Every structure is written in C-alpha cells, then in structure tokens.
Amino acid sequence: EVQLVESGGGLVKPGESLRLSCAASGFTFSNYNMNWVRQAPGKGLEWVSTISTSTSYIYYADSVRGRFTISRDNPKNSLYLQMNGLRAEDTAIYYCARTWGGYDSWGQGTLVTVSS
Amino acid sequence: SSKLTQPLSVAVSPGRTASITCSGDELRNKYACWYQQKPGQSPVLVIYQDNKRPSGVPERFSGSNSGNTATLTISGAHSMDEADYYCQAWDSNTGVFGGGTKLTVL
C-alpha cells in the first residue's frame, strides 16, 4: 500500500524557517516525480514544487521561488521542503503527492502556521 | 502562468447527472486531471489524462476535454459524491489547479 507521511509542520513567526519531511513507503520511491501542494485554511489547492526522480528537474511556484527548496533522498525514501523567510500567506496544510498520471497519492498533510 | 476557471458550486439531485467544467487557455492541448476532496480529508485523484479512471474510482465518474474546457461528469450522483472537486493541468512543467467546485447532492 502506498503511504506518504508528512511531518515538520508547526507554528512559526514571520521570517523564520521550517523544514518539512515526507516519508514514503509501499512503492519504489526513486521511480516517481514528487511534489508539494498546499491548501490555505478554507481555500483551494495550490501547487508549490516538483522534483524529478533523480533531481535533474526542479520547479517552483512563483509565490515560493527563492524562499523554498525542494529536495529528496532516494535511499531514505524521503522528500523534503526547506521553507525560509516564511510569510503569513504561507499558512496552509502542506501535502506531499506522488506524480503518476496526475497526483495519484497524497499524504495526510502537515499544518504550517505563520503568525506573530 | 495559465489559469483554470471552475464554477463555485454545482447542485444535483440524487441519481441525476452532474457536470463540472474547467476552462483555460490552450486546455485542449494539455491533459486535465480531477480531484475529489471531502471535508477534513486529503484530495483523491478521480480522473487523469482527461478521461482515465484510477483503480477503485467508480465508473460513474468520467471526464472529457474539448476546446478550452475540460468536464467532469458524475452519472447517477450519490450522496457520498458531495465534495469539493478540483481540476488540474500542467503548464510548462508547473502544476495549475482550478479554484474548486463544491458539489451538493440534494
């Protein structure tokens, strides 16, 4: 069974940093592009970033480029999102999602709250 | 980046057919996906590559993409289909979501 489990969320102040992790199991992690997608409270889904299987290709939404860094560790079956310079508008549930056709598997999400 | 436009809400009676549209420039040249999200839950992929259903998704869910509009059709809607639905496509390797449509079954 495919499982994606996010962790690392929490309450931080504007300007601070946070690192999210996503532990994958039940599939060959290194064979899939992976993504972060977020959802602000009561709002819709927003794609954040994508990383290819061997990290050759990395893409970011304009709203996070230059502040967020996606990475992966294939031997550890893990995906990461380093978030620096956090802003109030980054407050959201952050999901990791696998790409296959579409975003075919999602974690339960981890909540990031940015507030002074 | 491109924008995908969905109606805010759609209502359907149980057993009837619901259609949710998603409009965007050049959408006909892209694959569209659809996700279902129920309150407090993670999204679930229900349609990919315009009209393909992942394993486990009921046959009453179907999709199409023509012109600049992708459409999710739910034939014989059930009360359990009440949820938010999001379309999604890729634009220059970036993921783009529609704003979401709340489907009410009443």
Image (cartoon, rainbow, N blue to C red):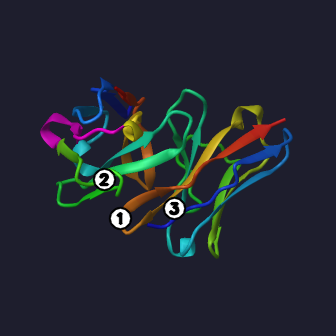
Q: Is residue B30 above or below residue B34?
A: below
Marks 1, 3: nearer the viewer? 1
Q: Helix, strand, or loop for circle 3?
A: loop
Residue hosting label 2: A50
Q: Helix, strand, or loop for circle 2?
A: strand
Relative placement, left or right, of A103 versus A25 is right
**Residue B91, x across and y down, in percent:** 42, 67
Residue type at the position of mark 1: Asn
Q: Residue furthest front?
A: A116
The residues tagged by marks 1 and 3 sit, at their Cα atoms, a distance apart of 15 Å
Label 3: few (<14), some (14–19) or many (≥20) C-alpha neighbours in 10 Å: some
Q: Are marks 1 and 2 in contact (CB under 8 Å)?
A: yes
The residues tagged by marks 3 and 2 sit, at their Cα atoms, a distance apart of 18 Å
**Residue A43, x across and y down, in percent:** 55, 40
Chain holding disc 2: A
Residue type at the position of mark 3: Gln
**Magenta span covers which residues?**
A73-87
Residue hosting label 1: B93
Label 2: few (<14), some (14–19) or many (≥20) C-alpha neighbours in 10 Å: many
What residue do we see at 13% from left, 39% from top?
Answer: A75
Chain holding disc 1: B
Relative placement, left or right, of B49 versus A72 is right
Q: Is residue A21 above or below residue B97?
A: above
What residue do we see at 49% from left, 45% from top?
Answer: A45
